[in-house]
Each structure stands twice: as C-alpha cells, then as structure tokens.
Image: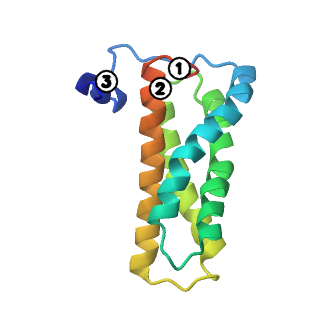
C-alpha cells in the first residue's frame, strides 16, 4: 500500500517553503527524453485504449496514445525546463501540466474530427479521457521523482 504522506507530497500539498528550481542540463534532458516518453506512453496509452470512444478503431486509439505524447512530450521535457530554468519547479509543473492535456485535446480534435462523426458528449468524454491519462502519468512521474528515480527536475 502507498504511504499517504507520499501521495500528499506527490500531489504538491506538502510543498517546501523555499521554491526548488529545475537543475537539469540540456544534455541530461535529451538522455531522459526516450525513457520518460516510454514511461508516459506506458501509462497513457492503456487509458486511451480503454477510455476513448469505441467509434475509434483500436488502431486509432493506439495511434493516439503514441502520437499525442510524441507531440507534446518533447516540449514539456526539452523546451519548458530551459524556459523556466529561473522559475520555481511549481511554475514549470503548472505550465507543463496545463499545456500537455490542452494541446493533446486540440491535436486529437484536429486529427479525428472528420474521420468519425461524434456528438458533443462523446467529444467531451474523449477530452476527459485525455486529461485523465495526462493526470495519471503526471502522478506516476511525481511518485518516481519523490523516490529519486529521475531527479532531473
């Protein structure tokens, strides 16, 4: 069973008094990119396979799991740490974790809006599934970071 204080810290409720700053170097970020991508896809793709509307084929849902992360992850891992290098980690996380699901919802809509006619409710459900997938991968990454597995950010 997961220690409740660990979950509380992972969700940011036990933030340190002094802000922590990203300590990543660009070379480290490039080395981390494939590992983090595979970790993220391993969490998000099953969520999308199960949760996205059945109006989409298995191939389309699987493609969405790989492609959406491939589009947003490099920005979150390579670009934002440099942009927010002098900001607190909280600012970096806030921007990254808003950017990723919003961008992925927009990309999903652009890619699939004409292929499968969907109702507004189905569209909102698919967006909610994308947001949940992103939230779960964020929590998974934070749990690993708290335990010192990554230590890049």
Q: Secondary structure at mark 2?
A: helix
- Taking 24 as reference, is 1 above or below it? below
Q: Which residue is mark 3?
A: 6
**Mark 1 to mark 3: distance in Å?**
14 Å
With 125 as the anchor, is 4 left or right in this view?
A: left
Q: Residue furthest front?
A: 1
Of the image marks 1 and 3, the number of the one nearer the N terminus: 3
Q: Residues within 10 Å of mark 2 (few under 14, many from 20)?
A: some
Q: Which residue is mark 1?
A: 149
Q: Residue at x 64, y 82 (%)?
A: 115
Residue closest to the eye, 140 or 30:
140
Label 2 close to label 1 by CB (< 8 Å):
yes
Residue closest to the eye, 52 or 151:
52
Residue closest to the eye, 6 or 78:
6
Q: Residue furthest left?
A: 4
Q: Position of residue 75 (x, y in %)?
A: 66, 42
Q: Quadrant of residue 124?
A: bottom left
Residue closest to the eye, 18 or 71:
71
Q: Position of residue 31 (x, y in %)?
A: 73, 26
Q: Position of residue 80 (x, y in %)?
A: 61, 35
Q: Secondary structure at mark 3?
A: helix
Label 1 close to label 3 by CB (< 8 Å):
no
Q: Which residue is mark 2?
A: 144
Of the image marks 2 and 1, the number of the one nearer the N terminus: 2
- Report the label total: 3
**Mark 3 to mark 2: distance in Å?**
10 Å
């Amino acid at each position: 069973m997961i220690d409740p204080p660990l979950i509380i810290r992972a969700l940011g409720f036990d933030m340190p008094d002094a802000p922590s700053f990203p300590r990543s170097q660009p070379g480290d970020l490039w080395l981390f990119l494939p590992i983090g991508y595979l970790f993220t896809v391993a969490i998000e793709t099953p969520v999308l396979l199960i949760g996205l509307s059945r109006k989409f084929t298995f191939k389309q849902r699987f493609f969405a799991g790989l492609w959406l992360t491939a589009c947003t992850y490099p920005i979150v891992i390579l670009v934002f740490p440099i942009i927010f290098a002098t900001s607190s980690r909280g600012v970096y996380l806030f921007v990254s974790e808003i950017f990723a699901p919003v961008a992925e919802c927009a990309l999903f809509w652009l890619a699939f809006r004409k292929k499968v006619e969907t109702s507004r409710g189905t569209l909102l459900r698919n967006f909610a599934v994308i947001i949940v997938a992103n939230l779960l991968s964020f929590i998974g990454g934070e749990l690993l970071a708290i335990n010192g597995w990554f230590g890049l950010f």
